[in-house]
């Protein structure tokens, strides 16, 4: 075994390389590794959170859908009701209108009858005067017999 | 079988492989033998060792240039590779090299968190540096033993040991670095008084009252001796364990390589199979030794952060 200056040379190299490692090698590598650990932990936490919020969103969407279905059913019901109501109203109106038209027509007919009767009545006086004139052979003074004529027409 | 022109000297082959490339100081009056001619140095001189004998004669005033160069180069490989990833490190999806680096960093960080209970931002990067650097140095063992020395020889460099961790200077250099950190943190965290108390009042607690108090200095002396031996044993065992394992592994590679002598034969094929087998087994050893060096460093530093 021959110990010589090589020993001190190696000690100097040892110090140099260890210092280099302490300064330039160890800190960047370990800090990068630590950072990555944090990143991964954050990522996993974020994934957990996302899963949870997805579940919440799904639940909410389901609820919304249910509500929407109920509302739609309600709307359809209301529309049906309203439709029925409108049909009923229309029917009622039509019946009323028919009634109205019928009464108006009846009234008209009545009026026509009355008018005809009136005409007939007035023409009865004239006709009876003319008939009487024919029978008597002379003119009948209408004014003189008006009382009798009126009585006659009233009897009609 | 072809007759060999040169007889193969197995022990020379092995010792050549175990010789570092040495640059050191030869003393004045040293006699150098070179290519048959004789030379006497007038002054002490820093020069390349031309033989194992010269390297040995340089003693302490020498540098293992190959060990240092490979060690430095592998350290630079570690730093460049990891700093490149660190510079572009993203907290997003990591790709390719970053995955690999993060795997190692995570592994080291996990181990440090398990074993080190004090608060010190230095320990984890220190452990990472040790683990990767020692692994890379050990990994050089898996490169065929003759490959790089032969290439170097073509460039006129006659000695080359490419596995820095088979050089006790390298492993003890790191272990002493760790030892200095241990002492520093012991003094800083526990305080000098608590540290000395820890060394002197264990394992035998000296009596504080009664007539037995005269025994206290003796017990303290025994404690101090035992604890200091224990303390010093830590860096030496740390450095020598790695050195021993890697040296033995390298030695086996070299020994198996001697079977390649004599051309293609049964021994050549067997040697090839053994090299592959040992290399596969050695993958486990180099990783394990790097890991053990790192773990013990962390444990020792953890001990110097613990207050009793």
Image (cartoon, coloured by chain):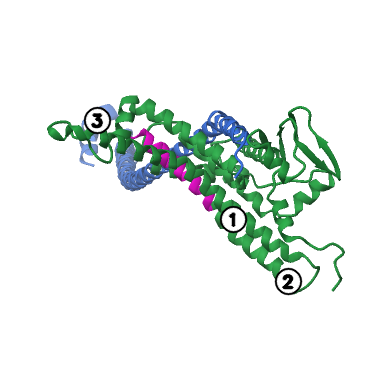
User: CA–CA distance between discs 2 and 3?
Assistant: 179 Å
Provide the chain ID for the residue under circle 2: B
- Estimate the spatial distance between the alpha carbons at disc 1 and disc 3, rounded to whole Å: 174 Å
Label 2 neighbourhood size at 10 Å, few (<14), some (14-19), many (20+)? some
Q: Nearer the viewer, residue A70 or A57?
A: A57
Asked if badges 2 and 1 are on one and the same chain, I answer: yes
Looking at the colours in the rendered structure, which chain would you say is drawn in blue?
A
Q: Is residue B296 magenta?
A: yes
- Is A59 situated above or below B173? below
Q: Which residue is mark 2?
A: B267
User: Magenta residues?
Assistant: B288-308
Label 2 vs label 3, nearer the camera? 2
**Residue to which mark 3 is pinned:** A146
**Is residue B27 rendered magenta in the image?**
no
**Residue B298 screen position, x and y as percent:** 44, 40
Q: Chain of mark 3?
A: A
* Residue tagged 1: B248
Could you tell me which secondary element the residue under label 3 belongs to?
helix
Cβ atoms at labels 1 and 3 below 8 Å apart: no
Front residue (pair B166, B53): B53
The green chain is: B
Q: Residue at x 54, y 48 (%)?
A: B242
Q: Is B15 positioned to the left or the right of A38 in the image?
A: right
Answer whether residue B307 is visible to the viewer in this image: no
* Mark 2 in CB contact with mark 3 (< 8 angstroms): no
Q: Main secondary structure of the magenta part?
A: helix
């Amino acid at each position: 075994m021959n110990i010589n200056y090589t020993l001190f040379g190696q000690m100097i190299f040892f110090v140099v390389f260890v210092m280099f490692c302490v300064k330039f090698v160890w800190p960047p590598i370990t800090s990068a590794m630590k950072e990555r650990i944090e990143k991964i932990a954050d990522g996993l936490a974020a994934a957990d959170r996302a899963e949870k919020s997805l579940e919440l969103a799904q639940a909410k969407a389901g609820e919304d859908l249910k509500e929407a279905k109920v509302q739609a059913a309600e709307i359809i019901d209301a529309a049906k009701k309203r439709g029925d109501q409108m049909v009923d109203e229309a029917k009622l109106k039509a019946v009323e209108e028919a009634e109205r038209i019928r009464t108006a027509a009846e009234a008209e007919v009545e009026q026509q009858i009355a008018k005809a009767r009136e005409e007939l009545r007035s023409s009865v006086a004239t006709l009876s005067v003319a008939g009487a004139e024919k029978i008597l052979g002379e003119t009948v003074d209408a004014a003189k017999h008006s009382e009798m004529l009126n009585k006659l027409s009233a009897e009609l | 079988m072809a007759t060999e022109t040169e007889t193969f000297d197995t022990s020379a082959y092995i010792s050549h492989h175990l010789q570092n490339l040495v640059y050191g100081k030869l003393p004045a009056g040293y006699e150098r033998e070179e290519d048959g001619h004789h030379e006497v140095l007038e002054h002490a001189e820093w020069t390349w060792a031309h033989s194992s004998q010269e390297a040995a004669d340089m003693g302490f005033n020498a540098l293992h240039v190959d060990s240092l160069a490979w060690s430095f180069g592998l350290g630079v490989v570690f730093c460049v590779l990891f700093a490149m990833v660190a510079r572009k490190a993203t907290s997003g999806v990591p790709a390719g090299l970053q995955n690999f680096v993060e795997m190692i960093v995570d592994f080291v960080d996990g181990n440090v968190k398990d074993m080190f209970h004090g608060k010190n931002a230095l320990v984890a990067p220190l452990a990472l540096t040790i683990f990767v650097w020692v692994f890379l140095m050990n990994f050089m063992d898996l490169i065929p033993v003759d490959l790089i020395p032969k290439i170097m020889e073509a460039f006129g460099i006659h000695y080359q040991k490419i596995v820095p961790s088979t050089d006790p200077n390298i492993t003890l250099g790191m272990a002493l670095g760790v030892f200095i950190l241990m002492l520093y943190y012991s003094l800083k965290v526990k305080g000098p008084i608590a540290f000395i108390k820890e060394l002197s009042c264990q394992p035998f607690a000296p009596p504080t009252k009664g007539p037995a108090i005269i025994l206290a200095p003796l017990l303290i002396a025994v404690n101090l001796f035992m604890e200091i031996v224990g303390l010093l044993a830590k860096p030496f065992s740390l450095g020598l364990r790695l050195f021993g394992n890697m040296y033995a592994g390298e030695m086996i590679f070299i020994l198996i390589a001697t079977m390649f002598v004599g051309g293609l034969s049964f021994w050549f094929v067997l040697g090839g199979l053994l090299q592959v087998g040992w290399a596969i087994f050695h993958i486990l050893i180099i990783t394990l030794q790097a890991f053990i060096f790192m773990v013990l460093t962390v444990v020792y530093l953890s001990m110097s952060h613990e207050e009793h």
